Image: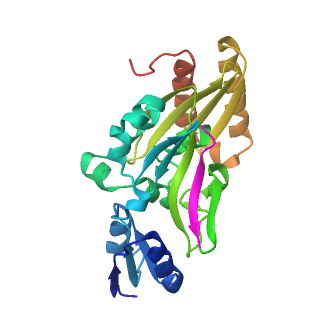
Amino acid sequence: MTLTRYIVPKSLNEAMDLLFHNQASAVVLAGGQTLVQEIKKGIINPKVLIDIQNLEELKYIQQVDNELIIGAGVTHSEIANSLLIKEVFPSLSKAAKLIADTQIRNKATMGGTLAYGDSFGDYWGLLYATDASIKVKTLSGERIVPVTQWLSGRYKVYLNLSELVTGVKIPIPSTSTFHKVPLFHVENMNFTIIENSANETKIAICGINDKPLLITLFGNEVSLYETFTEKIESFRNNNENLKSEEYDYRFHLAKVVCFQMLKGEDPFE
């Protein structure tokens, strides 16, 4: 199949109409940082390219009650530099700053990240730990998908060909910490700790399994690490594919980094 049409819709409704009539042969261009490379390599061969990069309807960052709502067209640089995000969810701002390089951050978008579904990516632990929801435009309206239902595996998302990601809704946590650790083969692990109340702590780890590993803990600081260790070891023991030696370092790293984070310390200082 050869690319024959490049279309720039003027509205979200026009984009949806184009998707509906070309869903078997069309792809959506948001930031294009991954999509363009896949086209060049022949991994995908679309006939129609629908460019939504300039749709103002998808470019917003706002707080509604205790939720942060980010449009699909917002770039990683805009997330990193948003004064609102720095104030209410600084860990999200930090994660955005650590994505790739400046050129990619200036082009790649939140919507592209959500639609691509690389569960090893920088945002996914934050989204899992906060119980975020994905906003999806459908032919009949809109559906809101809990992030834990959105990913069914690495690069596998709950998105139909005639649908479009329009944004994400993120409950604002009381406190949060985020750290990213580079690994071999250009991969990373990232760690998120969210506290929503005095007695609940959520830990999300990306880079171990095909979906973020989410562990919820209850109790004081003394008991948290012991419970965390028990739960992460139980998770590994119940998954045969994670028992090989190549995962030894990842699980060891998770224990060391999360131990320091639970104590309120920077594991890299």
Towards the viewer: 156 or 169: 169
Q: In this view, does 26 lie to the left or right of 204?
A: left
* As drawn, 44 above or below 239: below
Coordinates of residue 197 in the picture (x, y in percent): 66, 23
Q: Main secondary structure of the magenta part?
A: strand
Query: Residue 158 falls in which quadrant of the image?
Result: bottom right
* As drawn, 201 above or below 209: above
State the quadrant of the C terminus.
top left
Q: How is the image coloured?
A: rainbow
Q: Residue furthest front?
A: 65
* Count of numbered marks: 0
Give the extent of the magenta segment: 130-138
Coordinates of residue 41 in the picture (x, y in percent): 34, 72
- The answer to if 76 sits in the magenta stretch is no
Taking the spot 63% from the left edge, 73% from the top edge, the residue there is 140
Coordinates of residue 108 in the picture (x, y in percent): 35, 55
Query: Residue 206 falls in which quadrant of the image?
Result: top right
Q: In this view, does 251 lie to the left or right of 268?
A: right
Towards the viewer: 226 or 90: 90
Coordinates of residue 98 in the picture (x, y in percent): 36, 39
Can residue 182 be seen here? The reply is no
- The answer to if 131 sits in the magenta stretch is yes
* As drawn, 209 above or below 58: above
Can residue 185 be seen here? The reply is yes
State the quadrant of the N terminus.
bottom left
Q: In this view, does 108 lie to the left or right of 132?
A: left
Taking the spot 38% from the left edge, 43% from the top edge, the residue there is 79
